[in-house]
Image (spheres, helix red, strand yellow):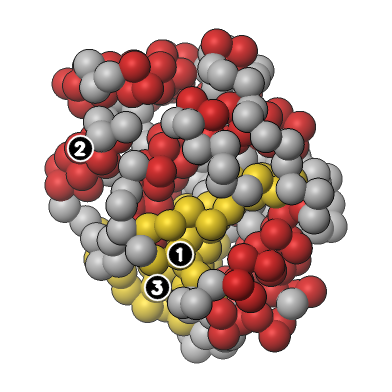
Amino acid sequence: MAPLIVDTDPGVDDAVAIMLALASPEVELLAVTTVFGNVPLAKTTTNAGRLLALCDRSDVPLGVGAARPLVHQQRERAETWHGGDGLGGRAAELPAPGADPDPRGAVELMAAALRASVEPVTIAPIGPLTNVALLLAVHPELAPRIERIVWMGGALGGGNSTTIAEFNAYSDPEAAHRVLTQADVPVTMVPLDLTMRCPAGPDWLDALADGGPRCAELAQVMAHYRAAYRTRHGRDAVAVHDAVAVLEAIVPGTLKTTAMPLQVACDLGPARGATVAVQGESAPVHVALDADHGAVLGEILERLRRL
């Protein structure tokens, strides 16, 4: 099994992604680490613990990470999409976390997992990149122990926090810039441009709800998100952003990527958080721009229904 760490800010689509990782026999989930993002850190951490407990996997170490961005305060959260508790108002209906978080915290837990792993580890950050930026800064000697970073975030077209900035990049642009411009670890970016093109519709959601008690609970968690998506986009579907990235982390090559150098706008003006293609000024990022959307959604659903 290939070793994997998921860094997350649950978040409804994060819940889908975490459960996808737990349902995939190709990977060993070494740790789940949490970061601020969709909701504050205390809620993202409890939510991650509840999701592990729902899947009877409280044995997976849980590390508490950054409560705020590297430099400036977070400008917005995403309760409108994810509910005040981050899980569509259903957090309290999930089992309580089955274990306390690891006392070392997210960065040191990731570092320990990297040192202990026989094989290089894939890190799948599906929230702001703060924890990963700190890991690379504090432990540069561990870069060779990282197979690659597969991040759900960024956008080359329109954003969802501003007209040009995607939420995870906008939440901590300085961290995103640090990770996307470094040359020590390969990075795959799964941007909004792709994830918005493969939303899960009513048939997919109904099949998920019929997939057993854990999938049924996940479908309930997604109900608020589904309603928000319908209100915003006028379509009965949900974008499972983070699960698309985690599937690529589990099955490399699922998504079709194009290599391009990127930078992230870190000024305080209207461009803040934009991910911008540049000419050869930094290491290229493998940007996922295309996929067989139906196959991606089908694979995610099939794996979830194994739980």
Q: Nearer the viewer, mark 2 or mark 1?
A: 1
Q: With 196 as the anchor, is 147 left or right in this view? A: right
Q: Is residue 180 visible?
A: yes
Picture quarter containing residue 289? bottom left
**Residue 57 badge:** none
Residue nearest the viewer, comparing 67 with 193: 67
Earlier-in-chain disc, 2 versus 1: 1
Instruction: Write down the quadrant of residue 80 in the picture.
Output: top right
Q: Hey, which quadrant is residue 95 in on the image?
A: top right
Residue drawn at (61%, 13%), measured in percent from left and top? 92
Q: Which residue is mark 1?
A: 3
Foreground tag (1 vs 3): 1
Q: Is residue 137 left or right of residue 155?
A: right
Give coordinates of residue 55: x percent, y percent: 45, 31
- As rendered, which of 144 and 113 lies closer to the eye? 113
Q: Which residue is mark 2?
A: 302
Tag 1: amino acid = Pro
Q: Nearer the viewer, residue 86 or 293?
A: 86
Pointer 1 local density, CA inside 10 Å: few below 14, some 14–19, many at least 20: many
Name the residue that disc number 3 marks.
286
At 27% across and 19% down in the image, what residue appears? Answer: 212
- Residue 140 position in % (x across, y down): 71, 82
The answer for how far apart the CA atoms under marks 1 and 3 are is: 20 Å
